[in-house]
Amino acid sequence: MKKLERLVLCIVLLSTLSAGASGLVSVSKGRLEAIWLSPMSVKIKNQTKTTRSFIQVKDFKLMAKAVTVKQFKEFLEKNSDWRKDKVSGLFTDANYLHGFENARDNSPVTNVSWFAARAYCKSQGLRLPTLNEWEYAAAASETLRDANKNELFLKRILEWYGEPQTEQIKEVGSIYKNLYGAYDMHGLIWEWVEDFNTTFVTGESREDSSFNKDMFCGAGSLASNDKENYAAFMRFAFRSSLKGKSSIWNLGFRCAQ
Amino acid sequence: MADQSSEVAVLTAPPHVPPPITRSKSVKLIVNLEVIEKKMKISDGVDYTFWTFGGTVPGSFIRIREGDDVEFHLKNHPSSKMPHNIDLHAVTGQGGGAAASFTSPGHESVFSFKAINPGLYVYHCATAPVGMHIANGMYGLILVEPKKGLSKVDREYYVMQGDFYTKGKFGVQGYQPFDMSKAIDEKPTYVVFNGSTNSLTGDNAIKAKVGETVRLFVGNGGPNLVSSFHVIGEIFDKVYREGAMEYNTNIQTTLIPAGGSAIVEYKVEVPSNLVLVDHSIFRTFNKGSLGIMKVEGPENKEIFTGKTADNIYLPEGGAIQKVNDKEKITTAASVEDQLKLGKTVFTNSCAACHQPDGKGIAGAFPPLANADYFNADAKRAIDIVKNGKSGKITVNGAPYNGVMPALGLSDEDIANVLTYVSNNWGNKKRTFTKTEVSAVPVAKENSGGEH
């Protein structure tokens, strides 16, 4: 009887995976091994043991696809404060919306600052995903919830990281759809997260091991978890190079709820 | 600083070096360096995505003067996927400028430093994962010239070694991504000068003329290996060890640490092809750390004669017999004899590179076994054994770009060894005669000194 219930639950879950009218997909709660965090030391009965680190996330919803140029144009029509000619230099840099006029409607909007991304999500009654939410959803491949140690999955990510962005950015939905129904979590663009600057990779990455070990720790992490985490490591290095007003050609966003 | 004039530094791509600094005063010097991620050839038919300072591996050579106030502009090209920064070993200050220059794609960072210590220094990227950024080619040299300048030389060149880690083995064709496991294990696929197996060979060889004094600014980017830098056919008159401003004299091989440098100087006395190598020698012949300096000019027999005699040494018989070119030592009376004698020649002169089974070594030494290139043209085969061969060839579909020297074999030996090769390993069973071999002319540059 229990088995049957579970099966029914599974079918119900699966049926919710296609994006609704709002373009949101559901990501069910769970925990994910945080291969980018250094292992924790835990004392159990006077014995110190090293355990792997995990992150926990609650149920949340995420846009199936990154916000497109077309969607952002509509946003600018109603929110002229965010137009290039009107926006404050406090919230954007000189790259803001560079090339926007010539971008294809169905391409992800890029060269947007964190402030602008937040404003967009807010206008939709949404928010940016947290770093943990984003990593949790992005860890999923087409078939696995946690593909972070899957060689083929990693290879695909690293190929994108390793290649300079010399061509026009592809359209949203063109890379792959993961188990939650979210498209292009890797391989299309970098994406903003709400707390992008809470990790401690400084420009002086070799010094990072002296930071609070409970937080992200650069050199220590690389030493502890070797080759499998360096894709994540590169992602964190990228995020830590950002400022709230940074606008980058291959950095866009999607919203969460 | 207000009374200083300002200048923009001239940067050069390897193997070139900016001209010596002639001014006698310190200036405010502006250095503009751009980070570009780009696909380039690491070897023939092998592509790799390099991360570069200035579009080349190693990065642009930076030449400044002791006492200069340097305003450094690091620009990360908008097409970059990664943030980058720079740690200059010439900088006194936090991280060598690493944190101050941490730059996301499409942005520029500016910081300033005073050049306090003269010397030749490495610079490199120090963004996480540091090893990967270095392994992808993010290093170069910065020379802080002492106030009194360096001694005058005729030519200066820029050579920098690096080790590379690709998924495919050495020479495997097509695009090859970075392999983190090999990098952690410190087992490089390629060890090369100036970012490619042929950056300093063939048409890219660096040049000098007899009588000139040459200065090489040599760096080692690593990330892992230490270089035993040596130039075959020369002795370094001076070595400024580890890029310091004091020198030692008469050095054969100098050790260059990863993240370190050396300045070597020598006067070229005779014409030859000097071979730049890492004398950890398997890297040179199997992983690519080989460069050529072509020295042209008149012979000087007092210093080097070339081969003047070819004698037979027979310790058991106790006799040393002078060989006249026209005399025959051993004459094959039959094809069987030719095969027997040819096998000995092959074992002594050919097998080291082409391997005892004739299969060669992929990417380095072309196969002779069942080889289309060998079978296609008998006259060409004779010519290669007689006169040597360098440059690009394709054998059984795979490209090779090496140097085979003229081996100085007699025409008889050449006929025998070619007959041996032709009648083994699936080749097309042709017999070569001495007459045929003699008909192929000796190339002028190989005719030796005594004629």
Image: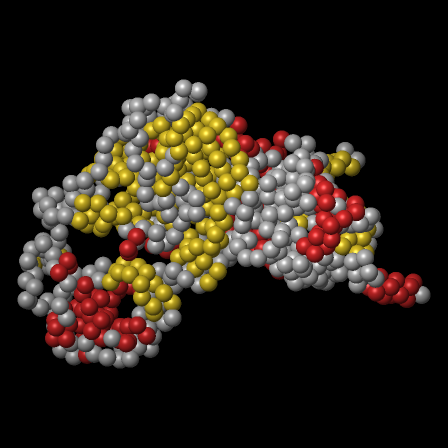
Please determine whether, in this image, residue B294 is positioned above or below residue B156.
Answer: below
Q: Which residue is drawn at 36% across and 23% down?
A: B26
The residue most toward the right is A1
Q: Which residue is drawn at 60% across and 48% down?
A: A98
**B346, B99: nearer the viewer:** B99
Please determine whether, in this image, residue B81 is positioned above or below residue B85.
Answer: below
Residue B276, image x, y percentages:
29, 47
Q: What colouring style does the render use? A: secondary structure
For the C terminus of chain B, the image quarter is bottom left
Query: Does residue B246 appear anywhere in the picture?
Result: no
Q: In this view, does B393 lie to the left or right of A193?
A: left
Quadrant of the image occupied by residue A38? top right
**B47, B351: nearer the viewer:** B47
Residue A47, image x, y percentages:
74, 36
**B376, A22: nearer the viewer:** A22
Residue B321, image x, y percentages:
7, 59
Please determine whether, in this image, residue B412 is positioned above or below residue B234.
Answer: below
Query: Does residue B403 appear anywhere in the picture?
Result: yes
Q: Which residue is drawn at 29% across and 63% down?
A: B351
Label count reads 0
Quadrant of the image occupied by residue A131? top right
Q: Residue at x 82, y 60 (%)?
A: A21
Residue B7, image x, y percentages:
38, 30
Q: In this view, does B218 lie to the left or right of A56?
A: left
For the N terminus of chain B, the image quarter is top left
Quadrant of the image occupied by residue B30? top left
